[in-house]
Amino acid sequence: MALLGEATMALLTRVGSEAIVPSGLAELVVHILGESGALDDPVVRSLLFEKLTPEEGQHLCELLMVATYAPATTLSGVEFDNDRVNADLLRRYFNVAADGGDAFAEPTQNATADHQLRAHQVNAYRKLRRLITDPTASALVHMPFGAGKLRTVATAVLDLYRGEADGRLIVWLSIGEALCDEVFDELHAVWQQLGSRNVTAFRVYGRHPTPDLDKIDNGIVVADVEKLFDNEAGLISLGQRTRALVLGDAELLSNPRAAGVVDSMSREGEFSVIGISASPASVIKARPTLQALAGKFSGACVSIEADDPVALLRAAGDADPIIVEVMKIASAGPDPLTATGVDLSTEEMNEISRDVERNHALLEVVLTEARASATPIVFYATTAEHARLFAGLLRLRGMRAAAITGEMSPQQRSLALQKFVARSDKVLCLHDCFVSGAEISEVSTAILARPTTSSALINEMVGRLASGRGHPENPLRIVVAGDPLPDYLVLAQGLGTWDALNI
Protein backbone atom coordinates (compact mmCIF):
# COMPACT_ATOMS: atom_id res chain seq x y z
CA MET A 1 0.00 0.00 0.00
CA ALA A 2 2.90 2.33 0.69
CA LEU A 3 3.86 2.09 -2.96
CA LEU A 4 0.55 3.60 -4.06
CA GLY A 5 0.25 6.26 -1.38
CA GLU A 6 -2.65 7.25 0.87
CA ALA A 7 -4.46 9.32 -1.77
CA THR A 8 -4.55 6.47 -4.28
CA MET A 9 -5.72 3.98 -1.64
CA ALA A 10 -8.49 6.35 -0.55
CA LEU A 11 -9.61 6.72 -4.16
CA LEU A 12 -9.62 2.92 -4.61
CA THR A 13 -11.94 2.45 -1.64
CA ARG A 14 -14.46 4.69 -3.43
CA VAL A 15 -14.24 3.45 -7.02
CA GLY A 16 -13.05 -0.16 -6.79
CA SER A 17 -12.69 -1.56 -3.29
CA GLU A 18 -12.76 -5.09 -4.69
CA ALA A 19 -9.32 -4.37 -6.25
CA ILE A 20 -7.75 -3.92 -2.82
CA VAL A 21 -6.18 -7.37 -2.88
CA PRO A 22 -2.44 -8.16 -3.36
CA SER A 23 -2.76 -9.19 -7.02
CA GLY A 24 -4.91 -6.17 -7.90
CA LEU A 25 -2.62 -3.74 -6.11
CA ALA A 26 0.45 -5.25 -7.81
CA GLU A 27 -1.13 -4.84 -11.24
CA LEU A 28 -2.04 -1.24 -10.45
CA VAL A 29 1.54 -0.52 -9.35
CA VAL A 30 2.80 -1.77 -12.73
CA HIS A 31 0.21 0.35 -14.55
CA ILE A 32 1.22 3.46 -12.66
CA LEU A 33 5.01 2.99 -12.76
CA GLY A 34 5.20 1.15 -16.07
CA GLU A 35 6.95 -2.19 -16.46
CA SER A 36 10.39 -0.65 -16.77
CA GLY A 37 9.67 1.89 -14.05
CA ALA A 38 8.54 -0.86 -11.69
CA LEU A 39 11.86 -2.65 -12.15
CA ASP A 40 13.66 0.65 -11.48
CA ASP A 41 11.92 0.98 -8.10
CA PRO A 42 14.05 -0.67 -5.36
CA VAL A 43 11.00 -1.54 -3.22
CA VAL A 44 9.24 -3.25 -6.14
CA ARG A 45 12.46 -5.08 -7.04
CA SER A 46 12.81 -6.34 -3.45
CA LEU A 47 9.24 -7.61 -3.45
CA LEU A 48 9.76 -9.31 -6.81
CA PHE A 49 12.94 -11.05 -5.60
CA GLU A 50 11.05 -12.33 -2.53
CA LYS A 51 8.45 -13.94 -4.80
CA LEU A 52 11.01 -15.77 -6.94
CA THR A 53 11.37 -19.52 -6.47
CA PRO A 54 14.88 -20.76 -5.63
CA GLU A 55 15.26 -21.99 -9.19
CA GLU A 56 14.12 -18.63 -10.63
CA GLY A 57 16.48 -16.81 -8.30
CA GLN A 58 19.39 -19.01 -9.38
CA HIS A 59 18.57 -18.43 -13.06
CA LEU A 60 18.58 -14.65 -12.54
CA CYS A 61 21.88 -14.86 -10.66
CA GLU A 62 23.39 -16.87 -13.53
CA LEU A 63 22.25 -14.21 -15.98
CA LEU A 64 23.82 -11.52 -13.77
CA MET A 65 26.98 -13.65 -13.46
CA VAL A 66 26.97 -13.60 -9.65
CA ALA A 67 26.91 -16.38 -7.03
CA THR A 68 23.90 -18.72 -7.32
CA TYR A 69 23.90 -20.71 -4.07
CA ALA A 70 22.05 -18.06 -2.00
CA PRO A 71 20.03 -16.07 -4.54
CA ALA A 72 17.92 -14.08 -2.08
CA THR A 73 21.00 -12.76 -0.28
CA THR A 74 22.95 -12.19 -3.50
CA LEU A 75 20.17 -10.37 -5.38
CA SER A 76 19.59 -7.99 -2.47
CA GLY A 77 23.18 -6.80 -2.88
CA VAL A 78 23.32 -6.41 -6.66
CA GLU A 79 23.56 -2.78 -7.86
CA PHE A 80 20.86 -1.98 -10.42
CA ASP A 81 20.34 1.77 -10.08
CA ASN A 82 23.82 2.83 -11.18
CA ASP A 83 24.83 -0.18 -13.26
CA ARG A 84 23.35 -0.11 -16.74
CA VAL A 85 24.49 -3.65 -17.58
CA ASN A 86 22.74 -5.14 -14.54
CA ALA A 87 19.60 -3.10 -15.22
CA ASP A 88 19.47 -4.30 -18.84
CA LEU A 89 19.96 -7.95 -17.77
CA LEU A 90 17.14 -7.62 -15.22
CA ARG A 91 14.81 -6.31 -17.91
CA ARG A 92 15.83 -9.13 -20.22
CA TYR A 93 15.02 -11.69 -17.51
CA PHE A 94 11.52 -10.27 -17.03
CA ASN A 95 11.10 -9.65 -20.79
CA VAL A 96 10.60 -5.92 -20.25
CA ALA A 97 11.64 -3.32 -22.81
CA ALA A 98 13.53 -0.26 -21.60
CA ASP A 99 11.60 3.02 -21.52
CA GLY A 100 12.30 5.50 -24.31
CA GLY A 101 13.33 8.06 -21.69
CA ASP A 102 16.83 9.25 -20.99
CA ALA A 103 17.35 7.52 -17.63
CA PHE A 104 20.60 6.08 -18.94
CA ALA A 105 21.53 8.82 -21.42
CA GLU A 106 25.25 9.41 -21.58
CA PRO A 107 26.29 12.51 -19.62
CA THR A 108 28.27 13.73 -22.63
CA GLN A 109 27.85 13.18 -26.35
CA ASN A 110 29.90 14.33 -29.34
CA ALA A 111 28.02 16.72 -31.60
CA THR A 112 29.71 16.11 -34.95
CA ALA A 113 29.70 19.00 -37.41
CA ASP A 114 28.94 18.10 -41.03
CA HIS A 115 30.51 21.39 -42.07
CA GLN A 116 33.96 21.20 -40.47
CA LEU A 117 36.88 23.55 -40.83
CA ARG A 118 40.51 22.72 -40.21
CA ALA A 119 42.31 24.46 -37.34
CA HIS A 120 43.87 27.19 -39.48
CA GLN A 121 40.54 27.73 -41.24
CA VAL A 122 38.74 28.17 -37.92
CA ASN A 123 41.23 30.85 -36.88
CA ALA A 124 40.89 32.64 -40.21
CA TYR A 125 37.10 32.36 -40.15
CA ARG A 126 36.92 33.93 -36.69
CA LYS A 127 39.16 36.81 -37.62
CA LEU A 128 37.36 37.46 -40.91
CA ARG A 129 33.93 37.17 -39.30
CA ARG A 130 34.86 39.77 -36.68
CA LEU A 131 36.22 42.14 -39.31
CA ILE A 132 33.18 42.10 -41.58
CA THR A 133 30.75 42.71 -38.73
CA ASP A 134 31.45 46.34 -39.62
CA PRO A 135 29.77 46.92 -43.01
CA THR A 136 32.46 49.44 -43.95
CA ALA A 137 35.35 47.04 -43.23
CA SER A 138 37.25 45.10 -45.86
CA ALA A 139 39.64 42.16 -45.56
CA LEU A 140 42.07 40.15 -47.69
CA VAL A 141 42.34 36.39 -47.17
CA HIS A 142 45.88 35.58 -48.25
CA MET A 143 46.82 31.89 -48.08
CA PRO A 144 48.59 29.32 -50.31
CA PHE A 145 46.67 26.87 -52.47
CA GLY A 146 45.32 23.92 -50.52
CA ALA A 147 44.46 26.07 -47.48
CA GLY A 148 40.69 25.96 -48.06
CA LYS A 149 40.16 29.67 -48.70
CA LEU A 150 36.86 29.17 -50.54
CA ARG A 151 35.27 27.22 -47.67
CA THR A 152 36.64 29.66 -45.08
CA VAL A 153 35.30 32.77 -46.79
CA ALA A 154 31.99 31.13 -47.73
CA THR A 155 31.44 30.18 -44.09
CA ALA A 156 32.22 33.67 -42.81
CA VAL A 157 30.09 35.62 -45.30
CA LEU A 158 27.12 33.25 -45.06
CA ASP A 159 27.32 33.22 -41.28
CA LEU A 160 27.09 37.00 -41.52
CA TYR A 161 24.29 36.86 -44.08
CA ARG A 162 22.00 34.57 -42.13
CA GLY A 163 21.59 37.33 -39.54
CA GLU A 164 20.76 39.97 -42.16
CA ALA A 165 17.23 41.13 -42.91
CA ASP A 166 15.53 40.15 -46.15
CA GLY A 167 16.35 42.40 -49.08
CA ARG A 168 20.13 42.13 -48.71
CA LEU A 169 22.61 40.38 -51.00
CA ILE A 170 25.92 38.57 -50.98
CA VAL A 171 27.75 39.14 -54.29
CA TRP A 172 30.74 36.99 -55.28
CA LEU A 173 32.77 38.07 -58.31
CA SER A 174 35.07 35.74 -60.23
CA ILE A 175 36.08 35.12 -63.82
CA GLY A 176 35.25 32.22 -66.09
CA GLU A 177 32.58 29.55 -65.83
CA ALA A 178 34.75 26.95 -64.10
CA LEU A 179 35.68 29.16 -61.15
CA CYS A 180 32.14 30.53 -60.88
CA ASP A 181 30.72 27.00 -60.82
CA GLU A 182 33.11 26.06 -58.00
CA VAL A 183 31.97 29.07 -55.98
CA PHE A 184 28.28 28.53 -56.67
CA ASP A 185 28.38 24.88 -55.58
CA GLU A 186 30.33 25.73 -52.42
CA LEU A 187 27.99 28.56 -51.40
CA HIS A 188 24.99 26.34 -52.03
CA ALA A 189 26.45 23.56 -49.86
CA VAL A 190 27.45 25.89 -47.02
CA TRP A 191 24.06 27.64 -46.99
CA GLN A 192 22.35 24.26 -46.70
CA GLN A 193 24.33 23.75 -43.50
CA LEU A 194 24.18 27.27 -42.02
CA GLY A 195 21.19 28.92 -43.66
CA SER A 196 18.47 30.55 -41.58
CA ARG A 197 15.90 30.77 -44.40
CA ASN A 198 15.33 29.94 -48.05
CA VAL A 199 17.15 32.24 -50.47
CA THR A 200 17.69 32.36 -54.22
CA ALA A 201 21.17 31.86 -55.66
CA PHE A 202 21.78 33.55 -59.04
CA ARG A 203 24.24 32.35 -61.70
CA VAL A 204 25.38 35.43 -63.61
CA TYR A 205 28.09 33.80 -65.70
CA GLY A 206 28.76 31.50 -68.62
CA ARG A 207 25.79 30.62 -70.79
CA HIS A 208 23.26 31.71 -68.17
CA PRO A 209 21.22 34.81 -69.03
CA THR A 210 22.02 37.98 -67.07
CA PRO A 211 19.03 38.95 -64.91
CA ASP A 212 17.85 42.53 -64.42
CA LEU A 213 20.20 43.71 -61.66
CA ASP A 214 17.57 46.20 -60.44
CA LYS A 215 15.26 43.30 -59.56
CA ILE A 216 17.70 41.14 -57.60
CA ASP A 217 16.81 42.14 -54.05
CA ASN A 218 17.41 39.06 -51.92
CA GLY A 219 19.85 36.17 -52.18
CA ILE A 220 23.34 35.18 -53.29
CA VAL A 221 24.81 36.32 -56.61
CA VAL A 222 27.78 34.58 -58.25
CA ALA A 223 28.90 36.62 -61.22
CA ASP A 224 31.61 36.76 -63.86
CA VAL A 225 33.11 40.24 -64.01
CA GLU A 226 32.90 40.13 -67.80
CA LYS A 227 29.08 39.85 -67.57
CA LEU A 228 28.74 42.96 -65.40
CA PHE A 229 31.40 45.54 -66.17
CA ASP A 230 29.40 47.48 -68.79
CA ASN A 231 26.18 47.84 -66.75
CA GLU A 232 26.92 50.84 -64.56
CA ALA A 233 23.32 51.72 -63.67
CA GLY A 234 22.51 48.11 -62.73
CA LEU A 235 25.68 47.85 -60.64
CA ILE A 236 24.85 51.03 -58.70
CA SER A 237 21.42 49.58 -57.93
CA LEU A 238 22.92 46.20 -56.99
CA GLY A 239 25.40 47.84 -54.64
CA GLN A 240 22.60 49.52 -52.68
CA ARG A 241 21.34 46.10 -51.55
CA THR A 242 24.70 44.35 -51.11
CA ARG A 243 25.97 43.45 -47.64
CA ALA A 244 29.25 41.79 -48.67
CA LEU A 245 31.16 41.68 -51.95
CA VAL A 246 33.72 38.90 -52.40
CA LEU A 247 36.48 39.11 -55.01
CA GLY A 248 37.40 35.52 -55.76
CA ASP A 249 40.66 36.85 -57.21
CA ALA A 250 41.63 39.96 -55.25
CA GLU A 251 44.31 40.80 -57.79
CA LEU A 252 41.51 41.67 -60.22
CA LEU A 253 41.39 45.04 -58.47
CA SER A 254 44.26 46.12 -60.71
CA ASN A 255 42.16 45.43 -63.80
CA PRO A 256 40.10 48.43 -64.97
CA ARG A 257 37.00 46.37 -65.68
CA ALA A 258 36.97 44.62 -62.29
CA ALA A 259 37.86 47.82 -60.45
CA GLY A 260 35.07 49.57 -62.34
CA VAL A 261 32.52 47.00 -61.13
CA VAL A 262 33.55 47.55 -57.51
CA ASP A 263 33.56 51.32 -57.91
CA SER A 264 30.09 51.36 -59.48
CA MET A 265 28.63 49.13 -56.77
CA SER A 266 30.25 51.34 -54.09
CA ARG A 267 28.81 54.54 -55.56
CA GLU A 268 25.65 54.37 -53.44
CA GLY A 269 26.23 51.18 -51.48
CA GLU A 270 27.99 50.42 -48.22
CA PHE A 271 29.30 46.89 -47.87
CA SER A 272 32.28 44.82 -46.82
CA VAL A 273 34.75 43.84 -49.53
CA ILE A 274 36.54 40.50 -49.04
CA GLY A 275 39.40 39.64 -51.36
CA ILE A 276 41.00 36.22 -51.80
CA SER A 277 44.54 35.64 -53.05
CA ALA A 278 46.78 32.57 -53.35
CA SER A 279 49.72 34.43 -54.88
CA PRO A 280 52.88 34.79 -52.81
CA ALA A 281 53.89 38.35 -51.99
CA SER A 282 56.78 38.15 -54.46
CA VAL A 283 54.32 37.52 -57.32
CA ILE A 284 51.97 40.28 -56.20
CA LYS A 285 54.88 42.72 -56.10
CA ALA A 286 56.07 41.61 -59.54
CA ARG A 287 52.65 42.34 -61.05
CA PRO A 288 50.85 45.70 -61.10
CA THR A 289 48.60 44.59 -58.24
CA LEU A 290 50.29 45.57 -54.99
CA GLN A 291 49.09 49.17 -54.96
CA ALA A 292 45.46 48.18 -55.53
CA LEU A 293 45.56 45.54 -52.78
CA ALA A 294 47.29 47.81 -50.29
CA GLY A 295 44.82 50.58 -51.01
CA LYS A 296 41.79 48.40 -50.33
CA PHE A 297 43.00 45.97 -47.64
CA SER A 298 45.79 47.68 -45.71
CA GLY A 299 45.88 46.45 -42.10
CA ALA A 300 43.24 43.78 -42.70
CA CYS A 301 45.09 40.74 -44.02
CA VAL A 302 43.86 37.32 -42.83
CA SER A 303 46.49 34.62 -43.21
CA ILE A 304 47.67 31.34 -41.70
CA GLU A 305 49.34 32.16 -38.41
CA ALA A 306 52.41 29.97 -38.80
CA ASP A 307 56.08 30.57 -39.60
CA ASP A 308 55.80 28.35 -42.68
CA PRO A 309 52.18 27.97 -43.88
CA VAL A 310 53.17 25.73 -46.79
CA ALA A 311 55.01 23.32 -44.48
CA LEU A 312 51.97 23.26 -42.18
CA LEU A 313 49.64 22.34 -45.06
CA ARG A 314 52.00 19.65 -46.35
CA ALA A 315 52.48 18.14 -42.89
CA ALA A 316 48.69 17.90 -42.57
CA GLY A 317 48.42 16.23 -45.98
CA ASP A 318 46.37 19.09 -47.40
CA ALA A 319 48.64 19.72 -50.39
CA ASP A 320 51.63 17.85 -51.80
CA PRO A 321 54.83 19.65 -52.81
CA ILE A 322 55.18 20.73 -56.43
CA ILE A 323 58.09 21.29 -58.80
CA VAL A 324 57.53 23.92 -61.48
CA GLU A 325 59.26 23.96 -64.87
CA VAL A 326 58.48 26.72 -67.38
CA MET A 327 59.22 25.47 -70.87
CA LYS A 328 59.64 27.74 -73.88
CA ILE A 329 57.23 26.68 -76.63
CA ALA A 330 57.57 27.49 -80.32
CA SER A 331 54.77 29.68 -81.59
CA ALA A 332 53.78 31.58 -84.73
CA GLY A 333 51.62 33.99 -82.69
CA PRO A 334 52.34 37.48 -81.39
CA ASP A 335 55.05 38.03 -78.81
CA PRO A 336 54.12 39.23 -76.29
CA LEU A 337 50.48 38.17 -75.94
CA THR A 338 48.09 40.70 -74.45
CA ALA A 339 44.68 40.26 -72.83
CA THR A 340 42.09 42.77 -73.94
CA GLY A 341 39.68 41.97 -71.10
CA VAL A 342 39.90 40.74 -67.54
CA ASP A 343 41.58 37.65 -68.97
CA LEU A 344 42.28 36.42 -72.49
CA SER A 345 39.04 36.49 -74.45
CA THR A 346 37.44 33.50 -76.15
CA GLU A 347 38.63 34.79 -79.50
CA GLU A 348 42.19 35.24 -78.25
CA MET A 349 42.19 31.74 -76.75
CA ASN A 350 40.86 30.23 -79.96
CA GLU A 351 43.61 31.90 -81.95
CA ILE A 352 46.29 30.57 -79.61
CA SER A 353 44.80 27.08 -79.65
CA ARG A 354 44.97 26.91 -83.45
CA ASP A 355 48.65 27.87 -83.69
CA VAL A 356 50.13 24.91 -85.63
CA GLU A 357 53.71 25.53 -84.47
CA ARG A 358 52.62 25.66 -80.85
CA ASN A 359 50.41 22.57 -81.12
CA HIS A 360 53.16 20.52 -82.76
CA ALA A 361 55.61 21.47 -79.99
CA LEU A 362 53.02 20.83 -77.27
CA LEU A 363 52.14 17.41 -78.65
CA GLU A 364 55.77 16.33 -78.48
CA VAL A 365 56.03 17.62 -74.90
CA VAL A 366 52.94 15.69 -73.82
CA LEU A 367 54.11 12.50 -75.54
CA THR A 368 57.57 12.79 -73.99
CA GLU A 369 56.15 13.34 -70.49
CA ALA A 370 53.61 10.52 -70.83
CA ARG A 371 56.20 8.01 -72.05
CA ALA A 372 58.57 8.94 -69.24
CA SER A 373 55.92 8.46 -66.55
CA ALA A 374 54.53 5.20 -65.22
CA THR A 375 51.47 7.02 -63.90
CA PRO A 376 48.78 9.27 -65.45
CA ILE A 377 49.45 12.87 -66.45
CA VAL A 378 47.08 15.80 -66.89
CA PHE A 379 47.11 18.23 -69.80
CA TYR A 380 45.30 21.54 -69.25
CA ALA A 381 44.32 22.51 -72.78
CA THR A 382 43.80 26.01 -74.16
CA THR A 383 40.15 25.51 -75.18
CA ALA A 384 37.57 22.70 -75.09
CA GLU A 385 38.20 22.05 -78.80
CA HIS A 386 41.93 21.96 -78.05
CA ALA A 387 41.39 19.31 -75.34
CA ARG A 388 39.40 17.09 -77.69
CA LEU A 389 41.92 17.61 -80.50
CA PHE A 390 44.83 16.55 -78.30
CA ALA A 391 42.97 13.52 -76.96
CA GLY A 392 42.43 12.42 -80.57
CA LEU A 393 46.02 13.16 -81.63
CA LEU A 394 47.44 11.30 -78.64
CA ARG A 395 45.34 8.24 -79.43
CA LEU A 396 46.55 8.49 -83.02
CA ARG A 397 50.10 8.36 -81.66
CA GLY A 398 49.32 5.24 -79.62
CA MET A 399 48.65 6.90 -76.26
CA ARG A 400 45.48 6.20 -74.26
CA ALA A 401 43.86 9.61 -73.67
CA ALA A 402 40.51 11.19 -72.79
CA ALA A 403 39.10 14.71 -72.83
CA ILE A 404 36.91 16.27 -70.13
CA THR A 405 35.69 19.84 -70.58
CA GLY A 406 33.39 22.39 -69.01
CA GLU A 407 31.03 21.96 -71.95
CA MET A 408 30.04 18.57 -70.48
CA SER A 409 27.47 18.32 -67.69
CA PRO A 410 28.75 17.51 -64.17
CA GLN A 411 27.34 14.00 -64.54
CA GLN A 412 29.12 13.50 -67.88
CA ARG A 413 32.40 14.77 -66.40
CA SER A 414 32.11 12.46 -63.42
CA LEU A 415 31.40 9.43 -65.61
CA ALA A 416 34.24 10.29 -67.99
CA LEU A 417 36.68 10.58 -65.09
CA GLN A 418 35.54 7.24 -63.68
CA LYS A 419 36.14 5.62 -67.06
CA PHE A 420 39.58 7.25 -67.34
CA VAL A 421 40.62 5.84 -63.96
CA ALA A 422 39.03 2.43 -64.53
CA ARG A 423 40.72 1.97 -67.93
CA SER A 424 44.07 3.18 -66.57
CA ASP A 425 44.29 5.74 -69.38
CA LYS A 426 47.49 7.75 -69.56
CA VAL A 427 46.67 11.38 -70.47
CA LEU A 428 43.68 13.35 -69.23
CA CYS A 429 43.04 16.45 -71.35
CA LEU A 430 41.12 19.06 -69.36
CA HIS A 431 39.60 22.44 -70.06
CA ASP A 432 37.40 24.73 -67.97
CA CYS A 433 37.00 22.21 -65.16
CA PHE A 434 39.12 20.95 -62.30
CA VAL A 435 40.20 17.56 -61.01
CA SER A 436 41.58 16.94 -57.55
CA GLY A 437 44.49 14.77 -56.55
CA ALA A 438 42.04 12.63 -54.57
CA GLU A 439 40.16 11.78 -57.79
CA ILE A 440 43.29 10.83 -59.72
CA SER A 441 45.73 10.19 -56.91
CA GLU A 442 48.50 8.63 -59.01
CA VAL A 443 48.91 11.72 -61.19
CA SER A 444 52.59 12.57 -61.48
CA THR A 445 52.74 15.48 -63.94
CA ALA A 446 50.50 18.30 -65.08
CA ILE A 447 51.17 20.26 -68.26
CA LEU A 448 49.66 23.73 -68.33
CA ALA A 449 48.85 25.04 -71.78
CA ARG A 450 46.08 27.37 -70.66
CA PRO A 451 47.63 30.86 -70.42
CA THR A 452 45.77 33.18 -68.06
CA THR A 453 46.17 36.44 -66.20
CA SER A 454 44.08 35.10 -63.30
CA SER A 455 45.91 34.12 -60.13
CA ALA A 456 42.77 32.29 -58.94
CA LEU A 457 42.55 30.17 -62.08
CA ILE A 458 46.16 29.02 -62.27
CA ASN A 459 46.27 28.30 -58.55
CA GLU A 460 43.03 26.36 -58.74
CA MET A 461 44.29 24.20 -61.60
CA VAL A 462 47.50 23.37 -59.77
CA GLY A 463 46.19 23.45 -56.21
CA ARG A 464 43.34 21.04 -56.83
CA LEU A 465 45.68 18.49 -58.39
CA ALA A 466 48.18 18.85 -55.56
CA SER A 467 45.46 18.38 -52.92
CA GLY A 468 44.45 14.91 -51.81
CA ARG A 469 47.14 13.01 -53.74
CA GLY A 470 48.61 11.60 -50.58
CA HIS A 471 52.11 11.27 -52.10
CA PRO A 472 54.25 13.97 -50.48
CA GLU A 473 57.34 11.89 -51.20
CA ASN A 474 56.69 12.30 -54.93
CA PRO A 475 56.19 16.02 -55.71
CA LEU A 476 53.75 16.88 -58.47
CA ARG A 477 55.62 18.17 -61.53
CA ILE A 478 54.06 21.21 -63.15
CA VAL A 479 55.30 21.76 -66.70
CA VAL A 480 54.18 25.18 -67.91
CA ALA A 481 53.98 25.95 -71.60
CA GLY A 482 55.75 29.31 -71.61
CA ASP A 483 53.34 31.29 -73.77
CA PRO A 484 54.60 34.90 -73.97
CA LEU A 485 51.92 36.42 -71.72
CA PRO A 486 53.95 38.35 -69.10
CA ASP A 487 51.42 38.14 -66.26
CA TYR A 488 50.98 34.42 -66.84
CA LEU A 489 54.71 33.74 -66.72
CA VAL A 490 55.05 35.64 -63.43
CA LEU A 491 52.17 33.63 -61.94
CA ALA A 492 53.59 30.35 -63.19
CA GLN A 493 57.09 30.97 -61.87
CA GLY A 494 55.69 31.76 -58.42
CA LEU A 495 53.61 28.61 -58.08
CA GLY A 496 56.19 26.71 -56.06
CA THR A 497 56.98 29.55 -53.64
CA TRP A 498 55.31 31.36 -50.75
CA ASP A 499 55.92 34.50 -48.74
CA ALA A 500 53.52 36.55 -46.66
CA LEU A 501 52.10 39.86 -47.79
CA ASN A 502 52.63 42.57 -45.19
CA ILE A 503 50.27 45.38 -46.04
Image (tube, rainbow, N blue to C red):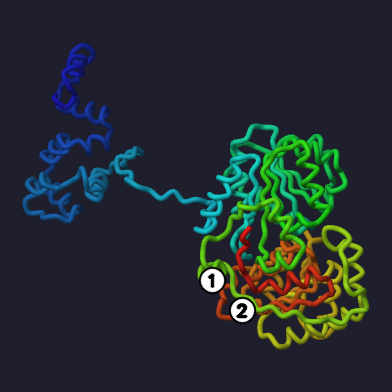
Q: Amino acid at mark 1?
A: Ala
Q: Residues within 10 Å of mark 1 (few under 14, many from 20)?
A: some
In the image, residue 468 above or below residue 38 = below
Q: Position of residue 209 (x, y in %)?
A: 85, 46
Please identify the quarter of the rendering in which residue 30 is found: top left
Residue farthest to the top, as pictured: 14
Q: Which residue is identified by label 1?
A: 311
Front position in the image: 189 or 45: 189
Which residue is painted at 65% across and 47% down in the image? 138
Which residue is painted at 50% across and 50% down in the image? 113
Q: Residues within 10 Å of mark 2 (few under 14, many from 20)?
A: some
In the image, residue 392 above or below residue 84 = below
**Disc 1 on helix, strand or loop?**
helix
| Left or right of 123 in this view: 233 | right
Q: Position of residue 156 (x, y in %)?
A: 59, 47
Kindly tell me whether residue 464 is visible in this rendering. Answer: no
Q: Position of residue 391 (x, y in %)?
A: 81, 76
Q: Which quadrant holds the N terminus?
A: top left
Please identify the quarter of the rendering in which residue 367 is found: bottom right
Query: Disc 2 vs disc 1: which is toward the camera?
Result: 1
Front position in the image: 478 or 442: 478
Q: Which mark is residue 228?
A: none
Q: Position of residue 425 (x, y in %)?
A: 72, 78
Front position in the image: 168 or 307: 307
Whichever of labels 2 and 1 marks the residue nearer the N terminus, that label is 1
**Disc 2 on helix, strand or loop?**
loop
Q: Which residue is identified by label 2?
A: 475
Front position in the image: 367 or 59: 367
Q: CA distance from mark 2 to mark 1?
A: 13 Å
Q: Amino acid at mark 2?
A: Pro
